[in-house]
Image: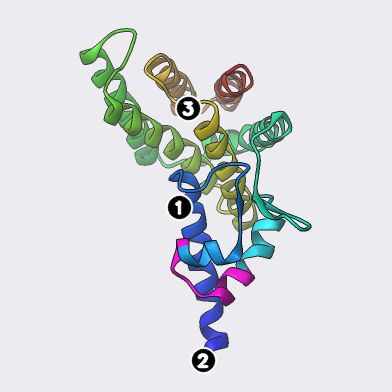
Amino acid sequence: MREKNTPKLSQKAYESFTHHLLGKALRAGQFISQRELVLLTGLPLGAIRELVPRLEAEGLIRTIPQRGMCIAEVDLKLVKDAFEFRLFLEIQAVKYFTKHAADDLVEKLLKETKDIIAQCAIQNNYKVKNSSLISNAQTVDWNLHEQIIKTLNNKIIIDTYRVNSIKIRLIKLEQTSLTEANVISTMNEHLEIINAVQLRDPAAAERAMVKHIENARFRALNN
């Protein structure tokens, strides 16, 4: 019975770890022990021991001899590698999405983006000071990219994208994210992508996606 439950507990441990990481209970570059992870996640040591190799394989932690486990550090190499991978993957994904995405999904994504822009316009034409609105805009931002990737219906790509997305979000937590100054421009970049998708123009969608990701990478590198 214990062996049957272990994979489920290990997955729960993984979900708890990423939740705490993205919730800032854990920080990039922080050292942490297995015992501390037990206390943090509320899960048994066996599940944590099975979790560690997965986190190491995904580059979310690294074990340093005589010092323990270190959560991935946000450095120049991580920023460059994560955004370069994202660019290569999403260029192909958005072209596929442009050809195959259901009209109702595209309309939903368009509405979500326009709703954020409309709320921004009500507050201020240049800066958005409502933290909940910025948070909602960030969710809309992530959702667009996740939907584009999910449309590929390829588990290997989806899982690999998910891991890289965790690293991107970790970078944003440490260095840059949507702010009152860039939320409107980011949503406008979304409109360019979605408008190209509606026109079923893969080349235009690719150009818009490249612009969007490179702007995000620029903010991360120049924060």
Q: Amino acid at mark 2?
A: Met
* Residue at the bottom extreme of this rendering: 1
Q: Which mark is residue 197?
A: none
Looking at the image, is mark 1 or mark 3 earlier in the sequence? 1
How crowded is the residue under tag 2: few (<14 C-alpha within 10 Å), some, or many (20+)?
few
Residue under label 1, please give it: 19
Q: Is residue 120 placed above or below 115 in the rendered structure? A: above
- Give the quadrant of the C terminus: top right
Where is residue 163? Give x, y as percent: 60, 49
Compare residues 143 and 62 and report the one nearer the observer.
62
Q: Are marks 1 and 3 in contact (CB under 8 Å)?
A: no
Q: Amino acid at mark 3?
A: Ser
Q: Quadrant of residue 171?
A: top right
Label 1 residue SS: helix
Q: Residue at x 40, y 14 (%)?
A: 181
Q: Quadrant of residue 184?
A: top left
* Left or right of 118 in this view: 15: right
Where is residue 31? Give x, y as percent: 62, 50
User: Cα distance, mark 2 to mark 1?
Assistant: 27 Å
Q: Is residue 54 placed above or below 168 in the rendered structure? A: below
Residue under label 2, please give it: 1
Magenta-highlighted residues? 40-50
Q: What secondary structure characterizes most of the magenta part? A: helix
* Left or right of 48 in this view: 101: left
User: Cα distance, mark 1 to mark 3?
Assistant: 18 Å
Q: Which mark is residue 177?
A: 3
Q: Quadrant of residue 35?
A: bottom right
Q: Residue at x 50, y 37 (%)?
A: 145
Looking at the image, is mark 2 or mark 1 earlier in the sequence? 2
User: Cα distance, mark 3 to mark 2?
Assistant: 44 Å
